[in-house]
Amino acid sequence: MTEIPAAYMDLLLEKKPLAHLATVMPDGSPQNTPVWFDYVDGKIRVNSALGRTKVRNMKLGAKVALSISDPGNPDRYVQLRGTVTRVRQDEIAAAHIDQLAYKYMGLDKNPYANPADVRVMFEISVFSVQGMS
């Protein structure tokens, strides 16, 4: 696991930028989606619902990339490349989306939640960092 330089930690821990998550489709083509994320215990965590394209692409061991721009200065960004090291589909994953709703919206519950959704949480270990600050 690669250490993320202190110059970018505000993007992970203090500000509320979206991450643009790139995954790889079965045919090898890229797929990109803006996502909410958090950074806990040295891992990037994202959440989605079962059945979505990124969930199908993000198997354990899958390689992904995230591009995170500073909301106050779009020329400042960090790109993280990593490996999916954990996939959860349990009560922790279900609670995680509400934690992200609190981070991004200040709400205790995700207002976009569909009770039929099965939530999936992915932990990503970073192996490469590039950026511009």
Image: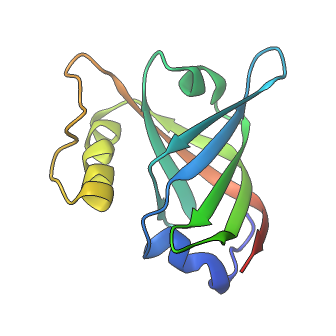
In the rendered image of this protein, does residue 28 appear above or below residue 37?
above
Q: Residue at x 65, y 24 (%)?
A: 57
Residue at the far bottom in the pictured view: 6
User: Which quarter of the rendering shows the N terminus?
Assistant: bottom right
In the rendered image of this protein, does residue 15 appear above or below residue 37?
below
State the image quarter where residue 120 is shown. top left
Total numbered labels: 0
Residue 76 vs residue 35, the one in the foreground:
76
- Taking the image as shown, residue 60 lies to the left or right of residue 131, namely left
| Color theme of the render | rainbow
Give percent across and percent down for residue 25.
74, 21
Q: Residue at x 63, y 77 (%)?
A: 8
User: Which quarter of the rendering shows the C terminus?
Assistant: bottom right
Give percent across and percent down for residue 23.
70, 34
State the image quarter where residue 88 is shown. top left
- Taking the image as shown, residue 118 lies to the left or right of residue 24, namely left
Give percent across and percent down for residue 86.
56, 41
- Taking the image as shown, residue 74 lies to the left or right of residue 127, namely left
Q: Residue at x 17, y 45 (%)?
A: 109
Q: Residue at x 61, y 50 (%)?
A: 124
In the rendered image of this protein, does residue 72 appear above or below residue 104?
below
Residue at the far right in the pictured view: 28
- Taking the image as shown, residue 75 lies to the left or right of residue 105, namely right
